[in-house]
Image (cartoon, rainbow, N blue to C red):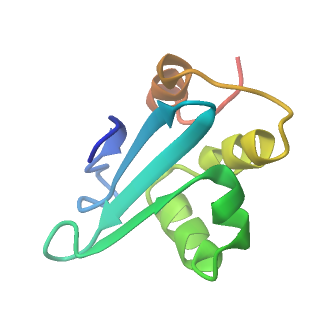
Amino acid sequence: MKGTVLISSPPQFPSFEIAHRAEGNKHYFEVAYGSSFNELYYEFTPKEFFESPDREELTLQFKRAGAAWMLSVLSALSEGKRQFTTEQLVAFASKGNVDG
């Protein structure tokens, strides 16, 4: 992973990992999971996520990993409604939501 790890090996999905990095004005997310860790790897911007044929699969895996909150983060970023720092995303991951 090139970015800061937000979630790694949650109890309900031990092979899951998600990371975030910002380059220029763009946010990038990396997701890896699988039986032989990193078997499946995705890298995308928020806009690419919503245009991707893998969106449904990734949505399922976010929910499985307890990271359903990522969907609202990706939506807000792709629509330009909000900006988040990596530190904020780390805090969301530790709380398991974007509230508060």
Q: Is residue 84 above or below residue 42?
A: above
**Residue 69 quadrant:** top right
- Residue 76 coordinates in the image, percent (x, y): 79, 40
Residue at the (40%, 58%) spot, across then down: 31
- Residue 42 coordinates in the image, percent (x, y): 42, 66
Query: Does 38 sit left or right of 21 as displayed?
Result: left
- Residue 99 coordinates in the image, percent (x, y): 71, 25
Q: Is residue 74 above or below residue 48?
A: above
**Residue 43 quadrant:** bottom left
- Check the image and name the residue furthest to the front: 24
Q: Which residue occupies the foreground of this view, 83 or 65?
A: 83
- Check the image and name the residue furthest to the bottom: 53
Residue at the (49%, 24%) spot, across then down: 86
Number of on-image labels: 0
Residue at the (55%, 20%) spot, across then down: 88
Q: Which residue occupies the foreground of this view, 95 or 54?
A: 54
Residue at the (24%, 62%) spot, across then down: 15
Q: Is residue 31 above or below residue 98?
A: below
Q: Is residue 45 above or below residue 76?
A: below
- Residue 29 coordinates in the image, percent (x, y): 48, 49
Quadrant location of the C terminus in the rendered image: top right
- Check the image and name the residue furthest to the left: 36
Q: Which residue occupies the foreground of this view, 44 or 7?
A: 44
